[in-house]
């Protein structure tokens, strides 16, 4: 990636956003937060459509409201697949995960 200064600001040219994240050493973290944001949003939308409150879902999952808040927090990536799967199931959904080839470059 090429960098140049313009008016005192470093600009990155000739590169992808992914390679920028790689160079900064934050690609995995950014991708994990992005995935969690999508999952959190999808669970919240399913709750809204089913008119299910956090309290009702927490009770159905046999967990605390604060644990459910952590599940729905888009920044909290330390949530187990089991917890996500159980929440999805309680909302009439299922979790689908796939492994894809990393992009070259």
Image (cartoon, rainbow, N blue to C red):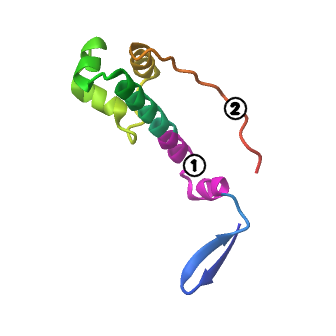
The first of marks 2 and 1 along the sequence is: 1
Residue 44, how many percent across, how many down? Answer: 38, 31
Q: Nearer the viewer, residue 90 or 10?
A: 90
Residue range in magenta is 17-34
Do the numbered discs 2 and 1 sit on residues whose CB atoms are within 8 Å? Answer: no
Relative placement, left or right, of 100 versus 25 is: right
Q: Nearer the viewer, residue 93 or 8?
A: 93
What secondary structure is found at the residue carrying circle 1? Answer: helix
Identify the residue at horizontal 23%, vertical 25% (top origin).
65
**Residue 91 picture quarter:** top left
Q: Which residue is most to the right?
A: 104
**Vertically, is 9 above or below 99?**
below
Residue 4, how many percent across, how many down? Answer: 65, 79
Check if residue 25 falls in the magenta segment: yes
Label 2 crowd bin: few (<14), some (14–19), many (20+), radius 10 Å: few
Residue of label 2? 100
Q: Nearer the viewer, residue 5 or 91?
A: 91
What secondary structure is found at the residue carrying circle 2? Answer: loop
Q: Nearer the viewer, mark 2 or mark 1?
A: 2
**Vertically, is 17 above or below 13?**
above
How far is mark 2 from mark 1, CA to CA?
16 Å
Identify the residue at horizontal 73%, vertical 67% (top origin).
14
**Residue 85 picture quarter:** top left
Check if residue 47 falls in the magenta segment: no
- Numbered label attached to residue 27: 1
Magenta highlight: main SS: helix
Residue 48, how many percent across, how many down? Answer: 35, 28
Identify the residue at horizontal 36%, vertical 25% (top origin).
47
């Amino acid at each position: 990636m090429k960098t140049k200064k313009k008016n005192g600001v470093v600009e990155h040219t000739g590169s992808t956003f992914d390679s920028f994240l790689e160079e900064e050493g934050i690609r995995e973290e950014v991708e994990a937060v992005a995935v969690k944001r999508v999952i959190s949003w999808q669970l919240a939308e399913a709750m809204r459509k089913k008119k299910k409150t956090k309290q009702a879902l927490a009770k159905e999952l046999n967990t605390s409201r604060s644990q459910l808040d952590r599940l729905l927090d888009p920044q909290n990536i330390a949530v187990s697949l089991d917890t996500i799967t159980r929440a999805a199931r309680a909302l009439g959904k299922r979790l689908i995960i796939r492994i894809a080839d990393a992009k070259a470059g």
